[in-house]
Each structure stands twice: as C-alpha cells, then as structure tokens.
Image: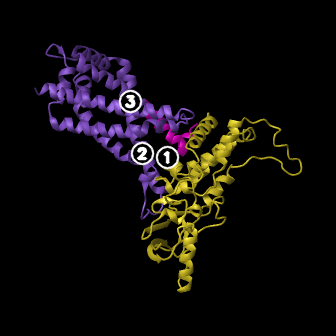
Amino acid sequence: MNLTLKIWRQKDASSKGQMVDYKVTEISEHMSFLEMMDVLNEQLVNSGEEPVAFDHDCREGICGMCSMYINGEAHGPDRGVTTCQLHMRMFKDGDTITIEPFRAAAFPVLKDLVVDRSSFDRIQHAGGYISVNTSGNTQDANAIPISKHAADEAMDAATCIGCGACVATCKNSSAMLFVGAKVSQYALLPQGQVEAADRVQNMVAQMDLEGFGNCTNTGACEVECPKGISLDNIARMNRELIKSSI
Amino acid sequence: MSGFFKSSIGRKVAMALSAFFLMFFLLQHLSINILSVFSPELFNEVSHFMGTNPVVQFALQPVLIFAVVFHFVMGFALELKNKKAQGVAYAKNNGAANSTWFSRNMVLSGITILAFIILHFIDFWFPEINTKFIQGDWSGLHNGELRYFHELQEKFVNPIRVVAYVVAFVFLGLHLAHGFTSAFQSVGGTAGRKKTLQTIGKAYSVIIPLGFIFVAVYHFLTNNH
C-alpha cells in the first residue's frame, strides 16, 4: 500500500517542531507499524535526510518504549496493543496517517517522536517497591498464602509496562492509571502492606510534583491502555490515599 | 489530613463530596417542585416550611451555598491545573474513540449550569432574601395567601425563560451523566459495584433533569391556556 505520513519533526528539546509530510510506497499489510517507520527511515537515509527518531526496544509489546500517537490515539487505532504490535493491515491503501509524540508537560519531547518519560521512573523510585532482603535468604514464594483473586488482580495491575499511553490519551495528562496500577500491585498483596501508607503518599506526592494533571474519570486511559489496566486501580489508589491520610 | 486536600486526589475527593451534597439537594428540590403539579396547597406548605425553618435557613442553606461555590471554584482550579499539565496540543486527537463527549466537557456543562444558577438566583433566591432578610417579612403571605405557588407560576409565563431552563436542565443531565459515577470513582467507591452505579447514574441523570423540565413546561402550558 502507498501512504502519506504526517510526522512531527523536532530537532531537539529546545527547538520548535512542526508536522512534515512524507510518502511511503509498497508497504506490506503484514508489516508492523515500526517496520513501516523503518522503511521510511531507510528512504530518508538513502536520500541524505535525517531519519525520524522514535523509541523502540523489544518490539513485542513488553518494554513499553514505543510511544507514538497515531491518528489521534496512543499506539494507534487497534485495541490492547503497543505501537510495535500494531499492524499495517489496520490501514488502507492511500491513507494519510498522522504520527505525533506523546504529549504532556511532564513528557517533554527530546527529538521528533521521542519523549522523556523519566517522570515515571521518579514516581516508581518514590515508593513503587517493597523493601525485602533478597541476598541469599529468599523465602519460598508460597510461604505466605495469597488468595487467587488477590493474586490475579495484583498480576493484572503489574502488567502495566509504563508506556505512558494513559498520560498521552488523557485530556488532563493525568498519570493516575499508571500510579494506580503501581500502587495496586502491592496494595493487593500481603508483602505490600508494611509500606502501604508511605508508598501511596510518596508516589502521589511525586506524581503531583512532576506536573501531571488530575483524573476526571473519562475512562479514555483504560480504553487506550495496551495492557487493559482497569480504572478500578485508580479507585483503589484513591481509597489507599484516603486510608493512609486518616 | 490538611496535606491530603492539597494533593490532586484529595482535591478530587473534595469535589466528589460537594457533588454528593449537591446531588442530594437536587433530589429534594425536585421532590418539592413536583408537588406544585399535583397539589399547589401542599407545595405552598412545604415551601413555607423550607423557607422559614431555622435548620434549613441557617444551617443547610449556608452549606448549600458553600457547596455550590466550592464545586465551581475547585472545578475551575482543577481545570486550570489540567491545562497546565498538557503539552503542545495534538494536531489530530480522536477523543471520541475512547470517551464520551460529556465526560470530556464537564467544564462546558458546568459553565452552562453556573449561568443557569445566576438566572435562577435572580428569579427566586434574591427576591426571597430581599423579602425575608431586608424587608423582614417571614410570613410567606401575599394578599392573605401563601405566595410560593403563585410566584412559581408567574416565572414560567415567559417562553424564553422556559426555554433557558430546559436547555440548562439538558446540560445538567449531561453533567450528571458523567458526574454521578465519577464522584463515586473519586472517593474509591466503585469497586465491585461499577455497573450498578453506572445504571443508577444513568437513571438519575435522566430522571432529575426530566422532572425539572416537566415542572417548568407544565406550568408554562397550564398558565398560558
């Protein structure tokens, strides 16, 4: 298929960017979206132009690096997939595809489609862990009984890959689905109880400090999340914060 | 606890608490208004009770005013913070793919409701305050009869006002369609009962505005024929 691409180009973090049009031809419908971007970049390199910078790593939907806003949606029009899992069969021959970086004040653009998501790392550092000694005296995983229901819900929350699609999608650039998932995965397990109050307090404080917006419960993040993280995690985080404040 | 209300989640919880109070108020307001359709005498009596009862006037009414002002001020404050949190606007953003129009435009429906409240205060509340607190007349009487039903009827003679009320109630419905469940979500109360709350929210957001529209249109039609 032949496509027109409208892509955000920005030289560096301090430059002003703009949308630039490109044509790509003979794109297979079996290609992933990133493979299509590779074809474009080969084309640009061959013609002596600067290739489009974009984040990617595992290319199998696990690392959370790919971060494009495609035709007005984070990770494009498909559901439950990252950009690397998005296939060109979702588009038609002759389509014009708009490709932008994830937008949020807390996700500044570094170059073209690459954004700085280290604000997520700092939120994790603030409390997204449990303090246990794992050097040589690791306990048996089944030593503490955990109900199937709690284990399943904690696992669902833990599948968040921190890609930032929730922030990019949210009209308020809120990070509450991400933080909600990270708080929930420990709040649901006995191992997470000891530091539960400090965890939610510190992670929410860091989230606010990073300049993310407030959740207005539109539910857009849940729809666009490649891992299907539920809004229930935001409700749980809210409960955890209320509980820890009383 | 003071630190809690400075956090983004704390502010949302405060918004939700004021919303719960306002939603309860809407329900009791409609219950009384509906009486005007079925029994003008009963409507007069209940209105007189609400207008002169010290608990309602000096305890609940200040709380109501505070809740209304707080809900709007905090709503705008949060909106400003959210605008600041956004980066450069997307060249193409397909919001309809993942959320409802009314959930994304709570500020717009809120501003419409605020405009309505100003009109409503000019229509009913300011004259009431004038009569009771400036003129000192707490009798509720006009020409020897309780005046409330007559005042209500008078207001719905003008078709422009009726249309303005109907439009405002439609926006109120849209605001409630998202706001009802959203308030429960903000206080973390949706766990395990999201579907039930969504159903109740849908019913509430239709019944309340339709009830108010019915009262306004009923008096317009019956008073003009």
Q: Is residue B19 above or below residue B30?
A: below
Provide the secondary structure element on which disc 2 rests. Answer: helix
The label number, if any, that marks residue B64 in the structure image: 3
Q: Which chain is purple?
A: B
Q: Are marks 2 and 3 in contact (CB under 8 Å)?
A: no
Inspect the image, locate mark 3, and give the three-letter code of the amino acid beneath it: Leu
Give the x, y percent position of residue B79: 43, 49
Residue that carries the numbered disc 2 in the rendered image: B103
Segment colored magenta: B1-20
Can residue A199 be seen here? The reply is no
**Cα distance in 3D space between marks 2 and 3:** 24 Å
Residue B177 seen: yes
As helix, strand or loop, the secondary structure at mark 1 comes to: loop
Q: Chain of mark 2?
A: B
Q: How is the image coloured?
A: by chain
To the question of a shared chain for discs 2 and 1, the answer is no
Q: Residue at x 57, y 57 (%)?
A: A81
Give the chain letter for yellow.
A
Structural distance between the alpha carbons of marks 1 and 3: 30 Å
Within 10 Å of the Cα at label 2, are there few (<14), some (14-19), or many (20+) other Cα atoms? many
**Which one is in front, B49 or B208?**
B208
Q: Which numbered circle lies on residue A219? A: 1
